[in-house]
Image (cartoon, grey):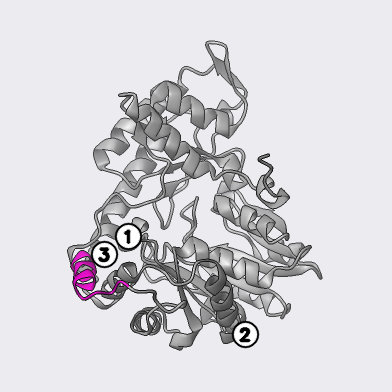
Amino acid sequence: MSQVSARIASLAVSETLAMSQKSNELKAQGINVINLSVGEPDFFTPAHVKEAAKKAIDDNFSFYTPVPGYLSLRQAICKKLETENGLSYKPEQIICSNGAKQDVCNVVLCVVNPGDEVIIPAPCWVSYVEMVKLAEGKSVVIRTGIEQDFKMTPAQLEAAITPKTRAIILCSPSNPTGSIYSKAELEAIANVLAKHPNIIIIADEIYEHINYLGKHESIAQFENIKDRVAIINGVSKAYAMTGWRLGWVAAPQWLASACNKLQGQYTSGASSIAQKAAESAYLGDQQCVEDMRQAFQRRRDLIVKLASEIEGFKVNKPEGAFYLFPECSYYLGKSYNGRQVNTSADLAMFLLEEGHVACVGGLAFEAPDYIRFSYATSDENIVEAMRRVKETLAKLQ
């Protein structure tokens, strides 16, 4: 007998991870696939961070850690929040976890009851809706499009709020669009939420440092809602540490305590070595962060230029992160050699199998007419990938 729970049976497989796996399978067969599906920097972890991890091993940081993380790391995170964001938090308000993904899920599970509604502006990261499903809540998806740079308006937010609304998940800079909410736009959203004191704001800021506009703006800066904001962040994107699995949440004390209680029962503390590495990342030289940001900005400009030259693509200019999210409905309903492309997922698979470029259909991001390309790869790969995409799409009639 192999019958899983209804809870697990209801969950979708992560489309981004599935496409990356499919890409790796084709590579294993000797096919030259360019992978633009994965959401991680292609850089190596900075040398001083690796040295800190090696030292931690030599210094025997090999025992269980406190559930919320080492005090020294949580103090470093508080210092980062104060110096970079102008936000004041105490170490006991910080919970370190096995990646920012766990922190989002922790908060959702700690605040959402069966039947509660969670507002999710779309396009959105593939896991948000599934996390709400896991908590037996209901996702209320607010649709946005390229014409509004994929940003939810205050009027859209107000219209989506009901007496059952328990939380909103806001990602800026955004995965999958790269859009960034300005301070004025965040303030307008905060003013709407201020009228609804029972709503928790989950602010996913994991792409904070990959920002092409200048200073990052956090919705937690507004006093009228700060006591209801859970900031999600970590070291994976800014410091090229995706595999280290170290994220954190900064939250009101009651919510941090709840996350600590939950995490204590199902994973306990994050890796001791990853924590010491993350501490070095936050306290050490930040030039590595800026160097990577500049490289991503150059690549952004390159892929925007090349994608804009592809017939049928509608392209905007992302303001952060490392994703391009063109509108691709021009190609839906077309076919090649008897192969029909009806959805953006079909289109992504067509590009993978026919053009050997891995990307992710927008259907996975609650945006069925779009497709996501990650430009966290070399300039050469971007040029070759866009050449293949252009040639492959031209086959569809």
Indicate the amino acid at tag 2.
Asn
Q: Which residue is mark 2?
A: 224
Q: Distance from label 3 to label 2 (Cα)?
A: 32 Å
- Residue 77's place in the image compared with 312, above or below, is below
Indicate the amino acid at tag 1.
Met
Q: Which tag is nearer the camera, tag 3 or tag 1?
A: 1
Q: Distance from label 3 to label 1 (Cα)?
A: 15 Å
- SS assignment at label 2: loop
Residue 27 visible in image: yes
Instruction: Give residue 162's quadrant in the image.
Output: bottom right
Image marks 3 and 2: residues in contact by CB distance under 8 Å:
no
- Say whether disc 3 or disc 2 marks the residue closer to the N-terminus: 2
User: Residue 220 at x, y = what percent?
Assistant: 53, 78
Q: Which of 354 and 329 lies nearest the eye of the viewer?
A: 354
Q: Which residue is mark 1?
A: 241
Main structural element of the magenta stretch: helix, strand or loop?
helix
Query: Which residues lie in the magenta part?
Result: 50-62
Residue 185 visible in image: no
Left or right of residue 46: residue 323: right
Residue 333 lies in the magenta stretch: no
Residue drawn at the location 63% of the way across and 66% of the way down = 108
